[in-house]
Amino acid sequence: MKRDNSAPTMKDVAREAGVALGTVSKVVNGIPVGESYRIRVEEAIKKLNYQVNSYAQGLKANKTYTVALLIPNTREPFFGLLAYHINLALLKRKYRLLLLSTDSDMAQEQEYITMAKQNKVDGIIGLTYNPDLVVEEGIPFVSIDRSMGAKIPCVASDNFAGGQLAAEKLADLGCKKVAFFRVGSVLNNEPNKRKAGFENGCLSRSLPYEMKIINTGESYDEFERFLLDHMRDGKLEIDGVFCVTDGLAYFTCKLLRRLGLRVPEDVQVIGFDGIRYFGNADYICSTIVQPVPDLAEMCVELLLQESMSAKPPLVCLPVTYAYGGTTLESPEEEDKGE
């Protein structure tokens, strides 16, 4: 008889179900048993409110069923969306997420990798910016947006194609001279290819362009100075802007309106990421959409693969364009084109 106020054990479940202890163990661990036995064990588990000790299970299997996700912050909507979908992908596989947010502190990235190893996670997914980051051999690791060597898979959107698509879209919508705005780290990573793609798209459409690029931490006032330098008699020489993120596109739209310019009538703006208001409503701007659910699935799938030989060094997933009110076409016209 189970003692009052004590947590039920596997023996209690076996006694309640009238089966052998080994049968309960098989049901708990997903090993096939006779249907009638399985039903009796599951009913006993429910009746007794028996909780499976997943930690003990993990010790036996030499696994913790926990994956660490290393991201710069949870404040930026794109990083939050990425964490949400990686968590969903892990939950489907009965894994838990250990979220590590560095607040863009590069030194903290290395400390978190050490901490994750000490907590014996089964692997790490990292969107990192430390150029000197060291990932010890033997730690399953998948990188997002940054190639870190042949033994660490990198998962990214097709950034080059996204930049090219943005340039071609602005050309198709009638722009005569465009600009590229970027804020980012000096790290050589996959998102840097948005610039090359944009240049290629402009050249292929004979579309004149200029660029304004600042590094992380520099003042956004540089973008205002750039625009003011291109004002002639109250009119802007540039009628289209591609911003390297939706956050920068949102800032640029506010800046343009503050300067007395209309968006999209005077200047059309396209961002990159696919951020939506409140997570699932309208896009905050016309944008090149990253396939975040697919990115998350691919990261988790590669991380949990046992064979290193089956892991490609780089996986690029396709991007799409979405109307978000900062370009000239209407949502109805966009729907007809899909």
Image (spheres, rainbow, N blue to C red):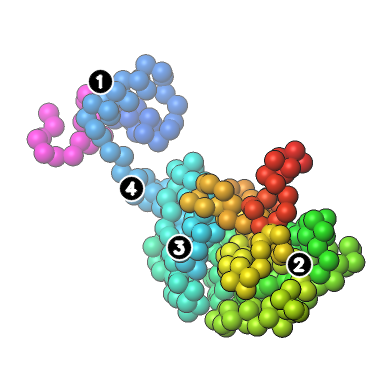
Tell me the kind of residue under disc 4. Answer: Ala
Residue denoted by label 2: 239
Q: Around disc 2, counting alpha carbons within 10 Å, would you say few (fewer than 14), some (14 to 19), or many (20 or more)?
A: many
Query: Circle 2 sits in a helix, a strand or a loop, which is it?
Result: loop
Check if mark 3's residue and mark 2's residue have beta carbons within 8 Å: no
Residue denoted by label 1: 18
Disc number at residue 56? 4
Examine the rendering and report whether any part of residue 208 can be seen.
yes
Q: Earlier in the sequence, mark 1 or mark 2?
A: 1
Q: Earlier in the sequence, mark 4 or mark 3?
A: 4
Q: CA distance from mark 3 to mark 2?
A: 33 Å
Tell me the kind of residue under disc 2. Answer: Asp
Tell me the kind of residue under disc 3. Answer: Thr
Residue 58: x, y in percent? 39, 49
Q: Around disc 4, counting alpha carbons within 10 Å, would you say few (fewer than 14), some (14 to 19), or many (20 or more)?
A: few
Check if mark 4's residue and mark 3's residue have beta carbons within 8 Å: no
* Residue drawn at 50 percent across, 77 percent down: 106
Considering depth in this image, is 107 or 2 the residue closer to the camera? 107
Query: Circle 3 sits in a helix, a strand or a loop, which is it?
Result: loop
Q: Earlier in the sequence, mark 4 or mark 1?
A: 1
In the rendered image, the vertical position of residue 243 relative to residue 39, given as above or below: below
Check if mark 3's residue and mark 1's residue have beta carbons within 8 Å: no
Tell me the kind of residue under disc 1. Answer: Gly
Q: Earlier in the sequence, mark 3 or mark 2?
A: 3
